[in-house]
Image (tube, rainbow, N blue to C red):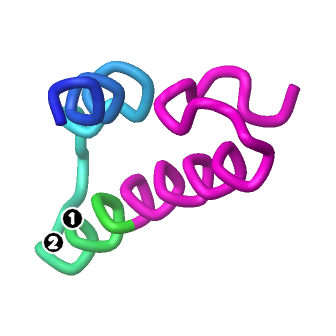
Amino acid sequence: METLFSQLCDQFMIRRNHAKSFDGFKNRILAKIMALTVIQLINKLNNKNINNLKICIA
């Protein structure tokens, strides 16, 4: 879990959010979490470590 939160903070900059409304905030956070989930799925399908986000496509 700590690795996941660290990656969200460092690579997806989840702490830095300049949304003007709650809906904007919600959409930005959901998009970042969805992107992380898709990368983990790609890694799982390619039999790679799911927490290794930087080399998912390579």
Q: Is residue 26 left or right of residue 10?
A: left
Indicate whether 38 appears above or below 22.
above
Residue with the most extreme front position: 47
Q: Which residue is mark 1?
A: 25
Give the number of marks. 2
- Circles 2, 1 touching at the beta carbon (< 8 Å): yes
Task: Give the mark toward the camera: 2 or 1.
Answer: 1
Q: Is residue 32 left or right of residue 16?
A: right
Indicate whether 10 appears above or below 56.
above
Task: Pinpoint residue 36: horizontal percent, then vertical percent.
Answer: 48, 49
The front one of 2 and 22 is 2
Mark 1 closeness class: few <14, some 14–19, many ≥20 residues within 10 Å: some
Q: Is 22 included in the stretch rendered in magenta?
A: no
The front one of 36 and 14 is 36
Q: Residue at x 15, y 71 (%)?
A: 21
Distance, label 2 to label 1, CA atoms, is 6 Å
Q: Is 44 included in the stretch rendered in magenta?
A: yes
Q: Which image quadrant: the N terminus?
A: top left
Bounds of the magenta segment: 31-58
Q: Which residue is mark 2?
A: 21
Q: Residue at x 41, y 53 (%)?
A: 32
Tag shown at residue 35: none
**Quadrant in the picture for residue 17:** top left
Q: Amino acid at mark 2?
A: Ser
Q: Residue at x 35, y 61 (%)?
A: 28
Label 2: which secondary element: loop
Indicate whether 6 appears above or below 46.
above
**Quadrant in the picture for residue 14:** top left
Task: Pinpoint residue 39: horizontal percent, then vertical percent.
Answer: 61, 48
